[in-house]
């Protein structure tokens, strides 16, 4: 009699339509997970969905502004209705803001914090009861090297972005204590990564930046995605409350 296969686990990826989020979706689908994409880019979500389906994953797309608390709860309800489980949450959605303290408006600051930091709260708050009910799982949140460096010249964004990304580190450490042992939560801090968000910077300063990176190249979404996939699936797991810098050892900013 053939052995019954265990149901595939489900990973949610915010900002999953392109860039690092798309890379994470591919890496987790390769690990055998089904995927729920959350983004504001329906056409690009559909493209990524088709790619993941070709890999054998079941995929749903959920259009949402991740800063919206009520919409996050509704998206999680949609995902539970479609998949019946949540095992992994990747908080990847974000946006930049290059303005300094004397230029930025209150609304611009609030929006930067809402999309980068509050979004993590929104989706963790809504997803955790379902992850716990299913026996536990993993959360990975995307911080930034800027959480340590402060958003210097090589950064797409400056202090408001760095502030939000530093907040993710505090949230991760606090929730590791609160959610363990059933849920492991970690943060990733990428350096300069070639994505749609950073293309203008990398095209203009790529050769200069590479001189200050020990591995001699810029990062790719796949570099980050492999670490996300490891933290989301490694067994046995004894890693939680940590932040992982992935920057090729960048010393010139």
Image (spheres, helix red, strand yellow):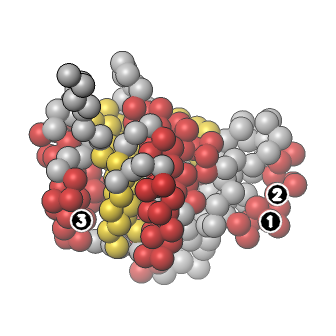
User: Against 70, is 142 above or below?
Assistant: above
Which disc number belongs to residue 203? 1
Residue identifier under label 3:
75
The Cα–Cα distance between marks 2 and 3, rounded to whole angstroms, is: 37 Å
Q: Secondary structure at mark 3?
A: helix
User: Badge 2, how many Cα within 10 Å: few under 14, some, many 20+?
Assistant: some
| Quadrant the N terminus occupies | top left
The residue lying toward the viewer, choosing from 207 and 155, is: 207
User: Against 42, is 113 above or below?
Assistant: above
Q: Secondary structure at mark 1?
A: helix
Which disc number belongs to residue 206? 2
Nearer to us of marks 2 and 3 is 3
Is residue 187 visible in the rendered image? The answer is no
Q: Position of residue 125 (x, y in %)?
A: 21, 53
Q: Position of residue 207 (x, y in %)?
A: 87, 55
Which disc number belongs to residue 176? none
Nearer to us of marks 3 and 1 is 3
Q: Based on the displayed image, in which of its 4 quarters is residue 87 positioned?
A: top left
Q: Is residue 27 left or right of residue 99?
A: left
Q: Kindly identify the residue that appears in the image at 87 percent across and 54 percent down.
A: 208
Q: Based on the displayed image, in which of its 4 quarters is residue 64 positioned?
A: bottom left
Q: Kindly identify the residue that appears in the image at 63 percent across and 67 percent down.
A: 196
Q: Position of residue 244 (x, y in %)?
A: 53, 35
Q: Kindly identify the residue that appears in the image at 76 percent across and 61 percent down.
A: 202
Q: Based on the displayed image, in which of its 4 quarters is residue 97 positioned?
A: bottom right
């Amino acid at each position: 009699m053939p052995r019954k296969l265990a149901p595939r686990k489900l990973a949610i990826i915010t900002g999953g339509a392109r860039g690092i989020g798309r890379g994470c979706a591919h890496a987790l689908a390769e690990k055998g997970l089904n995927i729920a994409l959350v983004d504001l880019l329906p056409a690009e979500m559909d493209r990524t969905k088709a790619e993941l389906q070709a890999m054998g994953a079941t995929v749903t797309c959920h259009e949402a502004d991740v800063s919206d608390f009520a919409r996050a709860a509704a998206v999680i309800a949609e995902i539970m209705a479609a998949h019946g489980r949540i095992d992994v949450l990747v908080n990847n959605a974000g946006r930049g803001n290059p303005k300094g303290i004397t230029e930025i408006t209150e609304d611009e600051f609030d929006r930067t914090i809402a999309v980068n930091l509050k979004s993590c709260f929104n989706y963790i708050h809504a997803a955790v009861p379902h992850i716990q009910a299913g026996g536990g799982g993993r959360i990975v949140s995307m911080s930034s090297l800027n959480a340590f460096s402060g958003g210097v010249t090589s950064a797409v964004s400056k202090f408001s972005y760095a502030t939000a990304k530093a907040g993710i580190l505090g949230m991760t450490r606090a929730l590791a204590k609160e959610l363990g042992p059933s849920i492991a939560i970690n943060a990733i801090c990428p350096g300069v990564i070639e994505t749609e968000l950073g293309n203008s910077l990398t095209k203009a300063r790529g050769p200069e930046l590479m001189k200050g990176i020990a591995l001699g190249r810029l990062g790719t979404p796949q570099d980050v995605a492999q670490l996300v996939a490891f933290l989301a699936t490694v067994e046995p797991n004894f890693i939680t409350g940590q932040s992982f810098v992935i920057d090729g050892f960048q010393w010139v900013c």
